[in-house]
Image: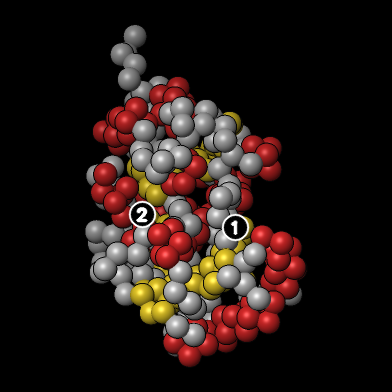
Amino acid sequence: MTKQHLIALDLDGTLLTDDKQINPQTKEVVLDAMNKGHVVCIATGRPHRASIDFYKELGLNTPMVNFNGALIHHPNNKYWDALHSPLSIRTAHKIIHKCHELGVKNILAEVKDSIYLDQHDDEIMKIFQTEDNNPVTVGRLQQNLKDDPTSLLIHPEEEKIKALRKELDTQAEFIEHRKWGAPWHVIEIVRAGMNKAVGLQKIAHYYHIPKERIIAFGDEDNDLEMIDYAGVGVAMGNGIDELKKMANYVAGTNEDNGIGEFLTEYLKLNRKAM
């Protein structure tokens, strides 16, 4: 019997195909791994509301890492020791002020599942999958945002990204900032020290699974710490070069059942005992 592993799955570009679905073959393998006693969790930059459908589709009953580690919680167990680590409102307002000075298309603040949008923007509403049950407050963030935000998302003009990131570097002691992959040139900001590895460590500890039996899959720069932390860090074939260099393995792409093929091989799934 293979020892129990913790399998951490990033969503976009990893578990999800380019059209934001779970490949049926991948799903089959992940369910097989769960049936064999392995623990599967989601670790994503997305908020809870934009991840929970995939969590349910896989029939998970494990903690989840959202907002790149700024929220670590158990969707099915409100007594689980959740960890919410937002930015301070003071730092957030400083950044919002700077963005207005520099001139950006829009800024969005999230306090867990509540959304504050600086100005109305259909395009942004679409990306953030805001449904009627998720309150959206549209209007000046400097006035409307009164709680410490879990994350800030800035949508700059493409030619202003460099200048903006340089400016954000001056706040390095308080924040982490990441750039989303194409086509969205969005800068995401969370509290300093927050990343997916923080969540993974907490979940592995909860299940008493040692580091060498953590398998983590990712594709972007917000997966670097998690891939580095896991005993078995796996970069997707479509992932960024920096991640591939750091990973222990490179799997196939998110379009080609990369996760499924890797797990079948690594965990010797679907194999009859000799």
User: Dividing the picture into quarters, in which one does residue 104 lie?
Assistant: bottom right
Q: Which mark is residue 185?
A: 1
Q: The residue tagged with tag 2: helix, strand or loop? A: loop
Instruction: State the residue in front, 58 or 116.
Output: 116
Instruction: State the residue in front, 247 or 160.
Output: 160
**Mark 1–mark 2 distance (CA, rounded to whole Å):** 20 Å
Tell me which label, 1 or 2, sits earlier in the chain. 2
Going 36% across and 54% down the picture, which residue do you hit? 51
Q: Residue furthest bottom?
A: 143
User: Dividing the picture into quarters, in which one does residue 102 lie?
Assistant: bottom right
Residue 68: horizontal and vertical position, in percent? 50, 59
Q: Is residue 58 above or below residue 89?
A: above
Residue 189 located left or right of residue 98: left
Report the amino acid beneath label 1: His
Going 44% across and 47% down the picture, which residue do you hit? 11
User: Dividing the picture into quarters, in which one does residue 4 lie?
Assistant: top left
Q: Which residue is mark 2?
A: 51
Residue 96 visible? The answer is yes
Residue 19 located left or right of residue 243: left
Q: Is residue 33 above or below residue 124?
A: above
Label 1 with label 2: CB-CB less than 8 Å = no
Report the amino acid beneath label 2: Ser
Q: Which mark is residue 240?
A: none
Going 33% across and 61% down the picture, which residue do you hit? 49
Going 46% across and 62% down the picture, which residue do you hit? 123
